[in-house]
Amino acid sequence: GKVYTISRGSLKPRNVKFNKTPHDYELNLGRDAEVEFCGEDKKIKHQLFDFKPINAIQDMPVETYVDIIGVVQSIEPISEIISSRTKKEHKKRVIRLCDTSNAGIDLTLWNEKAVEFDEKVLPTGAILAAKGLRVGDFSGRSLSSGFTSAFQINPELPEATKLHQWYQTTQGQGVTSLSASGGGGRGPSRRITIGDIQELRQNLDETKAEYFDLKATLIFCRKYEFDRPPWYEACPSDSCNKKVMQVDEGQYRCEKCDKIYPGRSLRYILSMMVADEDGHQWVTAFNTEAEAILGKTAEQLNEYVMNGDEESFNRTLQEPNLKEFVFGCRAKIDMNNEEQQIRVNLTKATPMDPLQEAKTLLDKIAKYDDL
């Protein structure tokens, strides 16, 4: 809502190579230009969006720039890559978004944005409005942030309210992703059974993963003792979360950050057995997913350990037993004692909604009726 007067600028047709706005002209400011702040006008919106449904991106040309609003389905840990062209290191983070068009897509954030938007800032279910994302064709259709991209989290917009209500009802079940699996992208959010997991082996290696949904019953969490609880002491920095070592009373050192912090955070690594009509499978839930399953943070569970309350500790770990969930899963080949094994990590954990599950089954039946 800030207002300025601008003088001694030059008006010319926009350079479509660099200016991705819908306007025909652009204002260039040289050394002689003058910009003066006049005050604020609260009637002026801070940011204007031209939202497009995610399913429409499938037909958009590559290099198109688009505004979207979506629900965060899952968020990957930050990773680092080396540019083959510049040989510089870049940070990246992939976020899966979905919307009421029943479509999902991968959004890759780079560098500062990849560090800023972690799972604390963008938890599962958060609404993200994004402006100026570039459409790519890497692993199907994907989106990428750029220098001019702008973001709003849980904005006060009618579209956000509608999207929140939709997600509260559906939990994003039945969404089809435009981003194919492999190469760092996420595959379609397809539903499989545990019996299908071993058949994925031919598509996997130590660098390639498969993504899928799994409706299963949580049988039990692995037995954990007080001296070996299901969490680790992590760096308190939002952009790190690596394991730390205690160097003194209340002092913890992070090797990655090369810093000593006056505290640490606790983050889950929870192993559990799940089963469906086709078999059973060990899976691993990390912090966000484990909190959704147990209903308590690692810090809260640690209070039982500190107080010697073994009964409450065990009861919390047993509470989700025999409950049904729809799990988002990431499967990858892992080497264990020189043997290849499929490791399955959770990317989301949603309690099974009978009403939504019935709708999903009816949709599948309808597809057979159309054959």
Image (tube, rainbow, N blue to C red):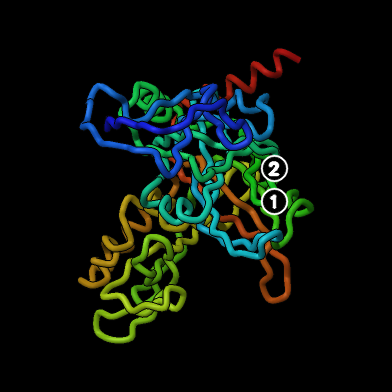
Q: How many C-alpha atoms fall within 10 Å of the one at disc 1: few (<14), some, or many (≥20)? A: few
CB contact under 8 Å: marks 2 and 1: yes
Q: How many C-alpha atoms fall within 10 Å of the one at disc 2: few (<14), some, or many (≥20)? A: some
* Residue 206 shows up from this direction: yes
In the displayed structure, 289 sits above or below 238; it is above
Q: Residue at x 24, y 84 (%)?
A: 249
Q: CA distance from mark 2 to mark 1?
A: 8 Å
Which comes before the other along the chain, label 2 or label 1? Answer: 2
Q: Residue at x 48, y 35 (%)?
A: 28
Instruction: From the top left corner, tell me how far across and down residue 186 is, in percent.
Output: 63, 44
| Left or right: 260 as drawn, with respect to 39 | right
- The quarter in which the C terminus is drawn is top right
Q: Residue at x 58, y 19 (%)?
A: 362
Instruction: From the top left corner, tell me how far across and down residue 167 is, in percent.
Output: 42, 30
- The quarter in which the N terminus is drawn is top left
Instruction: Name which residue type carries label 2.
Output: Phe
Residue 183's mark? 1
Instruction: From the top left corner, tell me how far across and down residue 368 is, in percent.
Output: 71, 18
Between residues 85 and 118, which one lies in front from this camera angle? 85
Dot 2: what SS? loop
Between residues 185 and 112, which one lies in front from this camera angle? 112
**Mark 2 or mark 1, whichever is nearer to me:** 2
Instruction: From the top left corner, tell me how far across and down residue 241 is, in percent.
Output: 42, 65
Dot 1: what SS? loop
Residue 138's mark? 2
State the residue lying farthest toward the bottom: 248
| Left or right: 13 as drawn, with respect to 291 | right
In the displayed structure, 149 sits above or below 118; it is above
| Left or right: 243 as drawn, with respect to 46 | right
Instruction: Name which residue type carries label 1.
Output: Gly
